[in-house]
Structures are given as structure tokens and as C-alpha cells.
Image: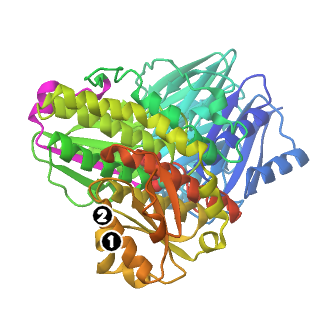
Amino acid sequence: MCGIVGYIGDKSPVEVIMAGLHRLEYRGYDSAGVAVVGAGKLDCVKSLGKLKELDRKLEEHPLHGNLGIGHTRWATHGAPSEVNSHPHFDKAKEIAVVHNGIIENYQELRAALQAEGVQFRSQTDTETIAHLVRKYYQGDLFAAVKRALQDVEGAYAIGVICKDEPEVLVAARHGSPLIVGLGENEAFIASDVPAIMKYTRKVLYIDNGQVCRITRDGYKIEDIHGNPVQLEVKTVDWDDAAAEKEGYPHFMLKEIHQQANVIRNTLRGRVHEGSDEVNLPDMNISVEELKGCEKIVIVACGTAWHAGMVGKYLIEKFAKVPVELDLASEYRYRDPIVPPHTIMIPVSQSGETADTLEAIRIAKTRGAKVASIVNVVGSSVARESHGVIYQHAGPEIGVASTKAYTSQCTAFALFTIWLAEVRGVMGKAQAREMIAHLREIPEKIQWILDNQEDIKRCAADPKYRDAQSALYLGRGYNFPSALEGALKLKEISYIHAEGYAAGEMKHGPIALVTNELPVVCVAVNGDTYDKMVSNIQEIRARSGIVLSVATVGNEAIRPHSEDVFYVPECFEPFSPIVVAVPLQLFAYYVAANRGCDVDQPRNLAKSVTVE
Ligand code: M6R
């Protein structure tokens, strides 16, 4: 998704903006641009492709001043091209706009502006904003932006500058993320915190419908009708090093390796050693609401939806509450029934996923209590929910979700224990035992991270590395592991991969099995192990290449498998958290060996802020 960075102050705006845009590369983009106000003019450089191309062009055509905005574009309206890239301008090129989101009524606005004689340069929805601001501009950029936004429908985060106001940066949001960073005699705007972490930790999270006038020594916030708004300045405690690779070739590999600590962080403060109690106060759900809950609805997209499936299995097994799991993009359009006493649990790493946000709004209007599992603090999902369990996974930069997934599963485990205890279906002894199992997970993950040789070897083996497609099978708690393993492989290596419930094999996918098809079988110790072995034998009988994920010490599985990735013995309901790690590593090394752009796979964006 598009990334926005803006700066006002004594530093070089181009340096600050380019450093920030590099930090936002994880969002995915196809073109980029920067505009700067200085020496009485507004100048701009744009390029198609990666930021290094923009860097090169900026060397040839330097921009000087004290005020600037920059953008990485992920095309929605109009093909990726230099002319469609941001910033966009009014006719006289005196007002520049960067935008993330979609203006839903842009065709009507465009037609109306054209009827007034405005000529458009691009096919974008964004350009309408630049012309609208110009239409209402009477020497006050802040006022013109507020007035222009009254005509606009849809989602936006925008940054606006004007040649005639070299000391004013205007920003606004509705539906797309935007923060303002406050420094000493300088200020920033950005789509996400990592873009400005190097310069300041003091942040304003601009809310929907708010417009901010920013100068180097202050700010003023109003809604689009001019009503004043007060916002609390928050201090961000993310570690700056977290946004760097710290010696790993890719963010994804770094984030995989962070998972032992990430799980500790997700548990931190919520469970104590030897305790039988879980503490989740930010969920903002009362004991009465938990006791009276008749249905739980989990909504999410992609990997977060797989975590939701782990959550469903855990909640139904241990807390005995019926759970409906839905893709947010389906939930929002299928007129869902929300009976009284429903709790919705949206799951989202970014907290900005458009479909998940819309599902929340629907459930809220139908009376559900909404408590979300979210990584990004202050994100839209967090703010639109009644309560939240923050994952505390730190920034996830790689487009492929890894540490976010395992921490989401861990958050579900915590919630399950809490819910089951409150509802009286889990005794203190069982709760203590489950908490102890959770606390063991980091060291099990660490064991896998310390024993990667077989994974690396297999990922370099042509029968896996050069495969055309792959099948992932799992049962019960590890059915979501199969889905997640397949998603990881396909999204970063571009090998076609499908995850299936192993019991579904004979209902179709077995037709695919040949001596060229790798079949990754999750067969860790547990209730469904024997059934998995039967499936493995069926695949071997058809010459499929079986790659098993099994429990350490299980030598019996070797004769049935071409290769085995071992994981430590684990409490089966929590095993998806551990099993995810070798599947992530395998996908990573296969993709890296194929020379793929692991952190920014083609066509994908980290944060899907449009549907
Ligand atoms: O930010 P979210 O957790 O809401 O994102 C959901 C999906 O877009 C995300 O998990 C996506 O599927 C990842 N590329 C998976 O690795």
C-alpha cells in the first residue's frame, strides 16, 4: 500500500523523506516521488520502480528547501507510471498532494472539475484532491484542505504543501493510517511509525475526519468542519534497531528468528510463573460479558485468518463457546447474523486491513462486542474495537507474516484460558498446566532455530526448490499449519502451493500426486498422528515426495518420508505455534535460493488498506 512521509524543519526534506520512504518499502509500491517547497518554488522528482531509481534522479536533480512531502505508490487507479505517481498538483503546480487510500466519488469530482475547465494529467483519484484544494484556496492552505475534504468520499491519508506557504504542512486522514511526529523545531508526517523513528518518538495518531496544520514549532487539529480537536501526544517505545535488518539478509529471516522473544513478549505481564491466571485487562470485556457470551466470531484476512482458525479450535475445545470463523472480505458482504451476546475477535497485524475494519463496523452496528488481536498500537482496528490484545511482536517489515502469526496464535491461547476459567469450564490445575505449556514454547522455537541444517539442505534440493507446485497437509490443530505453510511458500517463492485438511485428500487433491509433487505433511505427535501416517502412506504409494514435520525422537516416520523436519515434543493444541517455524524457514530458504525478492514479493503489499 502507498506510503507517505512529510517533513518541515531545518534538515534536508529530501534526506528525511527518502529515509522514511525506505523504511516504508515493506508496504509495497511501484513508483515514488518527492516534492519540496524552497526558494519561492515548488519542485518535484518522480520515478517508476524502486526507490533507488528515485535516489538516482534526485542526485541529478536535487531539491532544496525546508518543507517537503514524499510518497511510494501502490497502483489502484491508473497503471504504475511516472505520470500517475505522487505527488499530484493543481494546474499551476503550486499545490502538491500525496495520498494513500481511495477516493470513491472521484469520477463525479473529476467530471465536475473538468466541467469547470480543469485539465487532468493523470488517471488517479488523487489528482482530484489537488485541484479541489486549489479551487478552495484563498491564501489559507489549512482552510482549503478542510473545505476540499467536505466534497470527498472514501478513504484517505493525505499530505499537502503549497508554494505560497513554505512554513505549513497540512495532513488529514479518513480510513487510511497517518501519524504526525513532533521533534525539536521540526515535524513529520508518515503512514507508519518506522518511517520517523530515527528522529522522534513523540507521535500524534490522527483520527478519522481530522485535519492537522503543522508548523516546525506547533500544530493545530480540527475536523473538516473546523471544530477543534485535542489529541494526546503518545510516546512510541519501539526500538529503532527493530526497523533494521541487524545482519540478516532479509527482514523476514530476522523476524523468524525473533519469534522466541516475541512469544515471551506476548505472554509478558499476562501470565506469571506458577500462576493459574491470565490477565487481559485491555480486552475491555467484563466477567459478566464473558460468562454470558453465546457466540464468538473471528474475522481476519490471510495469515491472520489462519491464526483465527487456531483460535477457533482452541476456544471450542477448551472454553466450549461456539466460534464462527470468517474471512473479513466475505463477512462484510454476506449480511451476517449477529445474535445478542456475540463477541467478535478481529485479528490483524497491521490493524489497517480494510476488509477487517469494515467487518468490525458491521458487527458493532449489529450489537457485537469487539475485542481485537492487533500488533500495531494505535492502529485503526485497535481504535475501532471496544478492547484489544496487543501482540507486542514489534514492527513486522517483511511482507510475509511470520512473528505476527505465532504471536496471534499465542494471544488466542491466552484468551482461551481466560475465557474457559471465567466460564468455569477449566479448573485452576488445568489452567496452570496450560500456562506452563505456553511458557515452554519460546525454548522449543529456539531449538528449531538452532537446528536448521535439514531445512536449509532441503530448500536447496532441486526436487523442492524447482518444484512447480506443492501440497501441504495437516489435521486438527495443524490443519491451519498446512494452510499457513502453503501460503508462506506461494507468496514468497511463487511456487504454487495448496494447504488441505489431510482428510480431504481423497476428495480431490490426491489426483495431483506424482513423483514430482512435494507433499509437506504435518505429522507431529498427538490425537491425529495415526491418521496422518495413513495419509502419508497413500501419498508414498503414488510416488509423491513426502516431507514430514514430526516430533523429535520419531524415527518410525523416516521410512515413510523422503525428508523429515523435526520439532520438539509439544502440547498438541499449541503445536501450531511451533510447527509454523520450520514451515516459515523452508519457504524462506526456497524463495531465497530461487532469487526471489523475499521481503517484497511481487504484487503484494504489507498493509492492505483498500479492499
Ligand atoms: O495486517 P493484517 O494481519 O490484517 O494482514 C492480513 C493479511 O493481509 C496478511 O496476513 C497477508 O496474508 C500476509 N501476506 C501473509 O503473509
Is 262 or 135 nearer to us in this picture? 262
Q: Position of residue 77 (x, y in %)?
A: 55, 62
Residue type at numbered disc 1: Ser
Residue 421 position by quadrant? top left
Q: Is residue 60 left or right of residue 239?
A: right
Up the image or down, 443 lies above or below 202; here it is: below
Residue 570 can be seen, yes or no: yes
Q: Residue at x 61, y 26 (%)?
A: 239
| Cα distance between the residues tagged 2 and 1 | 6 Å
Residue 165 can be seen, yes or no: no
Q: Position of residue 545 (x, y in %)?
A: 51, 75
Disc 2: residue Cβ within 8 A of ligand 1's nearest atom: no
Up the image or down, 50 lies above or below 391; here it is: below
Quarter of the picture containing the C terminus is bottom left
Is 290 one of the magenta-colored residues?
A: yes
The residue where tag 1 is placed is 534
Residue 596 position by quadrant? bottom right
Q: Secondary structure at mark 1?
A: helix
Is 54 or 242 nearer to us in this picture? 242
Q: Residue at x 84, y 46 (%)?
A: 58
Up the image or down, 189 lies above or below 564; here it is: above
Q: Secondary structure at mark 2?
A: helix
Residue type at numbered disc 2: Asp
Judge the density around disc 1: few (<14), some (14-19), many (≥20) Cα neighbours within 10 Å. Answer: few
Q: Residue at x 55, y 81 (%)?
A: 516
Residues at discs 2 and 1 in contact (Cβ within 8 Å): yes
Which label belongs to residue 530?
A: 2
Which label belongs to residue 601?
A: none
Question: Which portion, as a residue range, is magenta?
Answer: 282-301
